Image: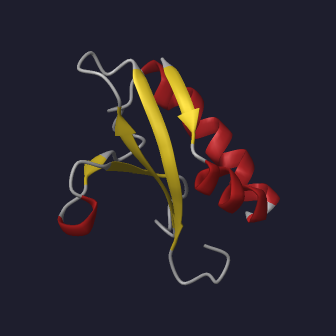
Amino acid sequence: MEIYLTSKFRKVYKKLPTHIKEKAKEKEKIFRKNPFNHILETHLLHGKYKGYWAFSVDYSYSYRIMFKFLDATKTKVAFNLVNCFFLKIC
């Protein structure tokens, strides 16, 4: 699987706490093998983010990675944003 990182994703990712970055790396490994692994809790977004998907980075659901499939075979993905609920860094 090819994962592309948007500039917005990179900018927010840099500001994340180290322990969250480590969890994100672990989840990315799982994502590369199977983006719909139950551990990730991958879900389709609605409304403003229709067409995007997200998966949880931590168990408190405070951090999620938003992404979009770039091809029909779902082998190319763009990580667009890290949603950080209740935090001012995102």
**Where is residue 55 drawn, in percent x and y?**
41, 49
Q: Is residue 63 left or right of residue 76?
A: right
Q: Give the percent coordinates (x, y) of residue 28.
A: 57, 34
Residue 48 to residue 20: above or below: below
Q: How many marks?
A: 0
The location of residue 53, given as percent across then percent down, is: 32, 47
Q: Is residue 30 above or below residue 6?
A: above
Q: Is residue 61 left or right of residue 21?
A: left
Q: Nearer the viewer, residue 45 or 72?
A: 72
Q: Residue at x 77, y 57 (%)?
A: 14
Outermost residue to the front? 7
Give residue 88's position: percent from left, percent from top. 64, 83
Q: Kindly identify the residue that appears in the image at 76 percent across and 65 percent down.
A: 15
- Whether 40 is drawn above or below 32: the answer is below
Q: Nearer the viewer, residue 87 or 58?
A: 87
- Depth check: give the residue in front, 55 or 48: 48
* Quarter placement of the C terminus: bottom right
Q: Quadrant of residue 46?
A: bottom left
Find the residue positioned furthest to the right.
Answer: 18
Q: Residue at x 51, y 70 (%)?
A: 62
Q: Residue at the spot x=33%, y=45% of the render? A: 42
Q: Nearer the viewer, residue 6 or 12?
A: 6
Decide if residue 74 is on the left or right side of residue 12.
left
